[in-house]
Image (cartoon, helix red, strand yellow):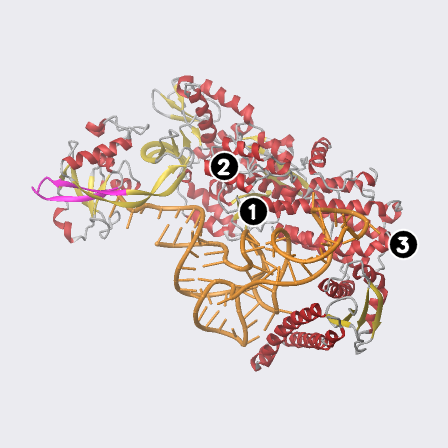
Amino acid sequence: MTAPEQLEKAYDPREVESRWYPRWVEQGLFEGKDDPAHTREPFCIVIPPPNVTGSLHCGHALFATIQDIYTRQARMEGKNALWLPGVDHAGIATQVVVERLLKREGTDRHALGRTKFLERVWEWKARAGGTIDEQLKVLGSSADWKRHRFTMDEHMSRAVREAFVRLYEEQLIYRTERLVNWSVGGQTVLSDLEVEQNEEDGELFEFAYDVSDAPGEQIIVATTRPETMLGDTAVAVHPDDARYQHLIGKQLRHPFVDRRIPIIADSILVDPKFGTGAVKVTPAHDFNDFATGKRHQLPMVNIMNKDGTLNDNAGEFKGMERFAARKAVKKKLEELGFAKGSKKHRLAVPRCSRTNTVVEPLLSEQWYVKADVLAKPAIEAVTSGKTVIVPEEWTKTYMHWMTNIQDWCISRQLWWGHQIPAWYCADCKHITVARETPGACEVCKSKHLTQDEDVLDTWFSSGLWPFATLGWPDADAPALKTFYPTTIMETGFDILFFWVARMMMMGIHFMGEVPFKKIYLHGMVTDEKGDKMSKVKGNVIDPLDVIYGIGLDPLVAKIKDGGATDAALKAARTTYPEGIPAYGADALRWTLATYPPQQRKIPLAIKRIEGGRHLCNKLWNATRFALPMLDGIPQGDLETPPAPESLADRWILSRLSATAAAVQQGIDEFRLDEATSALYRFFWNELCDWYLELIKPILAPREGAIDESRARITRATLARVLEATLRLMHPFIPFVTEELWQKLPKRKSAASIVVSEWPRPEARDEAAEREMGALQAAISAVRTIRTEHGISPAQPVHVRLATGDDAVRALLGKQELALKTLARTDPLELLPAGSGRPPGFATSSAGEIEVQVLLKGLVKRAHETARLDRETKGVQRDIDVMEKKLSQPSFVEKAPAEVIAESRARLEELKTAKRRLEEGRALVDELDD
RNA sequence: GGGCGGGUAGCUCAGCGGUAGAGCGCUAGCCUUACACGCUGGUGGCCGCAGGUUCGAAUCCUGUCCCGCCUACCA
């Protein structure tokens, strides 16, 4: 054991934190054990895999903290705990990054070819990947790194193929031509979820079509995308619209291309009250129009190439870029006199969430997963409670999405990802879908096969994550048998649909059992103003900078690298004039755990992390203080601590029990905020503020020798309470607790706090808690008078405590030492109630105890008058409220008896307090001016 | 348009039917032999607004106004 003197005065997290993680890993403390027989209760969390080439942000720090708290707590409870780490290949995001690199080199992926390009991505992954893993370790994440998984691992690829083939065989995967969301920037199709709808300013442009069979007559339509008129194949009006009755069935003349367009009646598409009541229909470029086209068997004229330029069908506009074409079409319509004006219009513009380019609805053939079949059992699992969502509010959102689910487009025109295991036969056109690369077409046996160029949506492989990482499709994989279904899925609510819902569907479908028993959704970490973290806004804080600290200049440089605006840089300079001090991982974890889970936004104020650091420092110092006092404690007193006798010892043990219960409840109910707040209050406001102060005169007396008969039990209690407190805090702040725990004398137990026993609540001692309350109230009352009058803390005062309760008087008598030490009373008199007020004494109340403090000679009259006025005012206000309440007949008649009794007692107490204050007023005349 | 969440002390948020709470801030005084990353006091709130239910409402109901998020096909 390190000598106590070696503990520094202030806690330095950097030194301590760097030391422990490697040791924990070396000792294999984080490893879950394959145990299909379940000899120990299994506990498992699979990590929401972060983007392999990303870097840690505060959102990661949040999930890492929460998941680690649960894993560590389960481990201490003796469960077979596994937190399985891993990363995701993040198809589009990663490919976009690498393509950007290539562009800088003056080349692109097509010039490189698929194989070479993929080599480059793997190269990039080798270099940039793994950053997050390292960062998670700095945070103290107790993950089992031996089981680390990557969504592009050999094994995961096998799982993906297996899943694809099975779903195809079950006809839950199919290929069809449909209108899709096409990302012009990413050159790939997107699922509905990957499209962001932004409200933007645009215009509603109106133009006319000539009715060819009725010379001189026109019909006016409106559009936000004028270029699409090149693909118009109908104009629709409402069947009941009187204005257009005579035109239904007539033909229109397209001004630019040689096409006759019918006027059709459609009550679904057309709202007669909007605009002109006539709608142009472009089935190949609009989702509504597509449906309309299907209803009326309209031709689908595609006018656009995949790169966003117009194709042959666009006639004279062929080859133009889409937005240039928009201008050109408008100009031409104006020249021909068809333009009928335009007005400003707010509209939802669909953008690609990765490239931010405008998404085009485009006709194309893609692979789909039939979702409603898979969704049904996933809905049932939540309805029946096999899987519980917390906070519970999210259940509705989950249900709503699941019940209105659309088929999921899973193919992507990317190269980075799992290539679709489908082969096209050049001869008979048959599609062979197989687990292993087929040598020949399964129908015509032709060898002319080409594999589908596309890859699967990243979320397809992510959907398999909770079981594929554990060994699926090998149904007998020991890890799978041990840990599936997993215990908790903890992640951000923003990927409830993207990921959680899909894991539910896939998990149930392939495993026949839900993938997790609890879904715990946390909020999104924002900056302190509640703004979403964004590199452009320059408000992204790297958790490592919070842990290790960073100077102003490097911080600003980092933010600048992220592409922040000048304004953002300036804001950063004013927000962090000194940079960020090193708070340590424990402080960050603690702070993140204190946010309530219902909160959608977690505005992480750097300043608030200071509170976490202060706590660690306090813990450090409390231990530093205790260690010398515990020196030489016999091991026997640690193994079986003697029963407490003193009030302080009984009280603190009872409070420890209460706290252990509160922490347990907080963890069970996913209220880590309540767990941390119970711990904080106990440790700071009870253990430090009172208990340590109370035992000072016993274990470190100001004068004279230690009374060993009293000291022995207290010493054992102190050791016991402090050690248990460290264990209760360990899941939240693992580093500092391990460091201190190692130094503390304790029972023979595990080599590390990581695998030490989780404290269980024991019996409460209500008498001790009540008695302590009286003592605390008396001490506080004296202190209030003292400070009010500016009496120096070192100056003893003459105090009289009067009570009619003999037991309380006896109690106070026994606590004379405590009163003397904590309130600096000398002399101290204990009297029966109604002992009067000798001249020179101020009076106050501590519950039913009357507190008198001799002020004569110590204070000025004005101070006392001010105190009396203030206190009387407060008491009077409470009396008024209570009297009014009790004077209402309806209250006395209808309220429960105990509530009435409580109110009456309270009123009596208030009245007594008031009377004492009034009597004390006479003191004013006894004081000097 | 629909859905969800929120509006409580200067700030960030708990509380969700019976005396308005915490942390930070502010303020007065203290280097009281663990901690100034500290100690002891104190200040501070028509609990968004309007109705209703109730003996009693920050807490339940209705309406309303703001603020966020998600979602939707208004050309």
Callout 1: few (<14), some (14-19), or many (20+) C-alpha neighbours within 10 Å?
many
CA–CA distance in space, label 2 to label 3: 59 Å
Q: Earlier in the sequence, mark 2 or mark 3?
A: 2
CA–CA distance in space, label 1 to label 3: 55 Å
Give the vertical position of A879 relative to A813 (above or below).
below
Q: Which residues are magenta?
A: A203-223
Relative horizontal placement of residue A711, taking residue A166 as reference (left or right): right
Q: Residue A366: where, in percent of width, then height?
A: 37, 32
Magenta stretch: helix, strand or loop mostly: strand
Q: Determine which of the numbered discs, if any, sits on residue A569 in the image.
A: 2
Q: Secondary structure at mark 1?
A: strand
Q: Chain of mark 2?
A: A
Identify the amino acid type marked 2: Leu
Q: Nearer the viewer, residue A545 or A864?
A: A864
Q: Chain of mark 3?
A: A
Q: Nearer the viewer, residue A452 or A46?
A: A46
Q: Which residue is mark 3?
A: A703
CA–CA distance in space, label 2 to label 1: 36 Å
